[in-house]
Amino acid sequence: MGGQNLSPIDLPMVITIDGPAGTGKSSVARHVADRLRFDFLDTGAMYRAIALAAVRRQSDLDDPRELEFVARHARIEFDWSAHPPAVLLNDEPVGHLLRSAEVTAAASQIAVVAAIRRQLVDQQRKIGQNRCRLVTEGRDQGSVVFPDAQLKIYLDADPAERGRRRVAQLRARGEVVDPAEILRQIVERDQRDSGRSTGPLAVASDAKVIDTTHLTQQQVIDSIVQMAREQLRGVT
Ligand code: DC
């Protein structure tokens, strides 16, 4: 078979990292990609960029048809030469605009619209075809987008711990926050992400679940990198 002649550095490999908000997924995924020299895809940024377009147009976030229209006219691309890759919305770099409370709330409404999910899932699969060594992070990457991924990780943590991490993150940015409100938002977002009918937050049957509640970020990164290296060794 042709594959037997490939060296480990030639073999395509997709690593999916899914899980709820506040598990440290984004930074873990970014560091894992750096350590392995893989490309890094932040799929949440794609939902957030469409949310930004909707917020700018003052769209009715409860109107799926309007949101579909916004999404069809929002060309989301990545500048892969930046580190991490920069998100472009119709050629405009928008990475710095995607983390506001308004865009975060809107993204979770964008993410329930089935037609938008189909559009982004198609695009994510195309990216996977072009970037043959990819760490991709989101909610449905292992369960829906890349069912054949070589390594699937699902990160989890107690909601209370996720709330504490989020509060620390916001306070570090100088924001004044109410911890009880943050926890309420996390639980609400979990329910919306898990309850939607298309691409819900779900653990793929072949995913390795890591409960990060009592782990440092470094421990999580090390264990995923080790699993990936074992996987790469296993195929030679
Ligand atoms: O990971 P994040 O917080 O940047 O994601 C933003 C929103 O998009 C969040 O509500 C979950 C949703 N999302 C999704 O539904 N599917 C993905 N693959 C990535 C994010």
Image (cartoon, grey):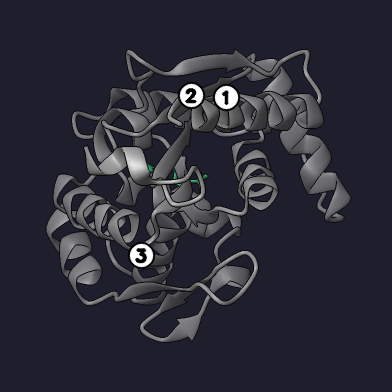
Q: Quadrant of residue 37?
A: bottom right
Q: List the residue tagged with mark 1.
A: 230
Nearest to the eye among marks 3 and 1: give it. Answer: 1
Please report the residue visible at 35 percent of the width from the left and 31 percent of the height from the top: 142
Residue type at mark 3: give it: Ile
Q: List the residue tagged with mark 2.
A: 234
Marks 3 and 2, how far apart in space? 39 Å
* Residue behind label 2 places its C-beta within 8 angstroms of ligand 1: no
Residue 50's mark? 3
Nearest to the eye among marks 3 and 2: give it. Answer: 2
Marks 3 and 1, how far apart in space? 37 Å
Badge 1: how crowded within 10 Å, few (<14), some, or many (20+)?
Answer: few
Q: Tag 1, which secondary structure?
A: helix
Location of residue 91 with respect to 174 vertically, above or below: below
Marks 2 and 1, how far apart in space? 6 Å
- Residue farthest toward the bottom in the current orientation of the protein: 91
Q: Tell me which label, 3 or 1, sits earlier in the chain.
A: 3
* Residue behind label 1 places its C-beta within 8 angstroms of ligand 1: no
Split into quadrants, the picture shows ligand 1 in the one at top left
Please report the residue visible at 68 percent of the width from the left and 18 percent of the height from the top: 212
Which of 63 and 23 lies nearest the eye of the viewer?
Answer: 23
Residue type at mark 2: give it: Gly
Q: Quadrant of residue 58?
A: bottom left
Location of residue 147 with respect to 41 vertically, above or below: above
* Image side of residue 40 versus residue 177, left or right: left
Which of 67 and 165 lies nearest the eye of the viewer?
Answer: 165
- Residue 23: percent from left, percent from top: 63, 29
Location of residue 124 with respect to 36 vertically, above or below: below
Q: Is residue 83 visible?
A: yes
Badges 2 and 1: C-beta atoms under 8 Å apart?
A: yes
- Residue 162: percent from left, percent from top: 68, 25
- Residue 200: percent from left, percent from top: 30, 29
